[in-house]
Image: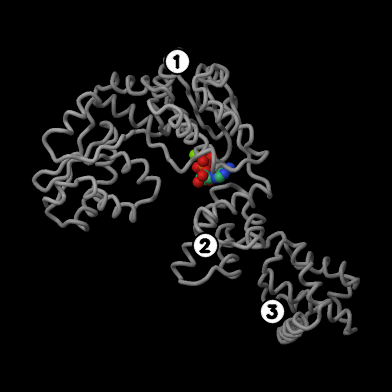
Amino acid sequence: MDNIKNNIASAWSQVHGCLEKKLPDHAIHAWFEPIFPVGFKNNIFHLEVPNQFFLEWIESHYKEDIIKAIKEVYGEQFKYKLLVTKEKTQKNEDRNSGASPVETKPKRFNNLNLKYTFENFIVGSNNEFAKTASESVSNNPGEQNFNPLIIYGGVGLGKTHLMHAIGNQALKKNNNLNIVNITSEQFTLDFVNSLRKNKTIEFAQNYRSADILLIDDIQFFRGKEQTQEQFFHTFNVLHQNGKQIVLTADKFPGEMKGLQSRLLSRFQSGLSVDVQPPNFEVRVAILLEKAEQNGLTLDYSTIEFIARHIKTNVRELEGTIIRLLAKSSLLNIEINNQLVTEVVKERVGGKIGNEVSIENIVKKVSEISQVKENDIVGKSRKMEIAEARQVCMYLCRDIMGTSLNNIGMFFGGRDHTTVMHALKTVNEKKDNDVRVEKMITSIRKELGFSFL
Ligand code: ADP
Ligand code: MG
């Protein structure tokens, strides 16, 4: 117990570590990293949190998790108590008295995700302007033409990443900035809580003291009239004082429904920049970066395969890499082609190779082998025609996993044993006959399956 008391920070970090294993990253980041252990008395950890809102949120969402983690690390008799951080001036005095000393390190309650930086943001034509504008804002916050800066676009395209990067970069330049970073949902909850507790003045002060206010996903203000009202006033105070406001949204502000027009017109005084889905090259670059970040080496053809199939957004690309890692370590197997195909299939809802059809394969084989499509699907047993047909059967099975019966039916109503024989023949030829091997490789490539 004395151990805990003497080094409360490291004692708490054990519990934190235990929580980290159980809760998602974003939860740890948003709610647990800002917790500051300040003392230990009567088997109770005293933990400081930035504000009342934080305290209530943690108590209502994570109480059981914390109790369990403490129990797991130290035993049942240990408990915790949350305290709201006092004013800065008092804080150091408090910390130096009473409860055991704590390693003091500057602690900022801004929830910024340190992983989101400009350095690791990959730029392509889809997001170049948004990144440049964001950098500019982080270097000169409050500059009139870029205030507010609104980053808008679809999900998983890097809006939150850029917003946090602005905060992180601005802090690097000036460590004293008060950066308030919050999602519009947290803002709403915070406001509702302040109403309940008659603390709207504190609420207003809290937000209006920001040097940079970052609010994520303002589309969730839709239809919440009173919150919008509060936000409008906060916005005006900050704007008038030359403080920077950065907002993200799912749509161009002009197209947002359910937001008051006076707010929308305020937004027009600044700059709106969009992020678009990445094109193929950017997807490849992102995959390479994310693989490296996760200590994963993938060969180029695998990366290309993923980039060709996962097109919607960056979060999906990242998710694919994480899933690959998770599966390979859970199943204790190397990452191989089969695993990659499986994971990609899962993520695109089993629609892999959807753009490939039997007809498509026949067409390609016909082009390369110079055998007419009609002959390929016909009855002729002429050698070059039979070979082209067998190659088609092989590719249907290999790329799309079509059943033997269906393949047989398509190619002139043959039964499945004929198809099996065809697959075996092509398999052998592929290894011994360069011409057949080349034909298969080049068709796979054209269909985007070069790596299989
Ligand atoms: P959004 O807020 O637009 O929904 P996020 O910012 O949360 O998207 O991005 C989703 C994930 O993709 C994050 O992990 C982020 O780091 C990553 N990401 C998005 N765009 C890029 C990019 N251009 N370069 C590197 N990572 C990116
Ligand atoms: Mg986001």
Residue 431 in percent (x, y) is at: 75, 81
Front in this rendered view, residue 84 or 311? 84
Q: Confirm or deny contact between disc 3 and disc 2 (CB under 8 A).
A: no
Report the Cα–Cα distance between label 3 and label 1. Answer: 68 Å
Query: For mark 3, what is the residue?
Result: 404
| Distance from Cα at disc 2 to Cα at disc 1 | 47 Å
Q: Secondary structure at mark 3?
A: helix
Q: Foreground: 429 or 101?
A: 101
Give the percent coordinates (x, y) of residue 43: 11, 48
Dividing the picture into quadrants, the one containing residue 185 is: top left
Instruction: Tell which tag, 3 or 1, sits nearer the viewer.
Output: 1
Residue 21 in view here? yes
Going 88% across and 84% down the picture, which residue do you hit? 383
Expressed as whole percent of the image width and height from the top left, the position of residue 417 reads: 71, 87
Between discs 3 and 1, the one toward the N terminus: 1
Nearest to N terminus: mark 3 or mark 2: 2
In front: mark 3 or mark 2? 2
Question: In terms of sequence position, does the residue under pointer 2 or pointer 1 come before the other?
Answer: 1
**Crowding at label 2, few (<14), some or many (≥20) Cα neighbours within 10 Å?**
many
CA distance separating discs 3 and 2: 29 Å
Q: Secondary structure at mark 2?
A: helix
Q: Is mark 2 within 8 Å of ligand 1?
A: no
Identity of the amino acid at label 2? Leu
Q: Is residue 324 above or below residue 173?
A: below
The residue to which callout 2 is attached is 324
Q: Residue furthest top?
A: 240
Residue 314 falls left or right of residue 10:
right
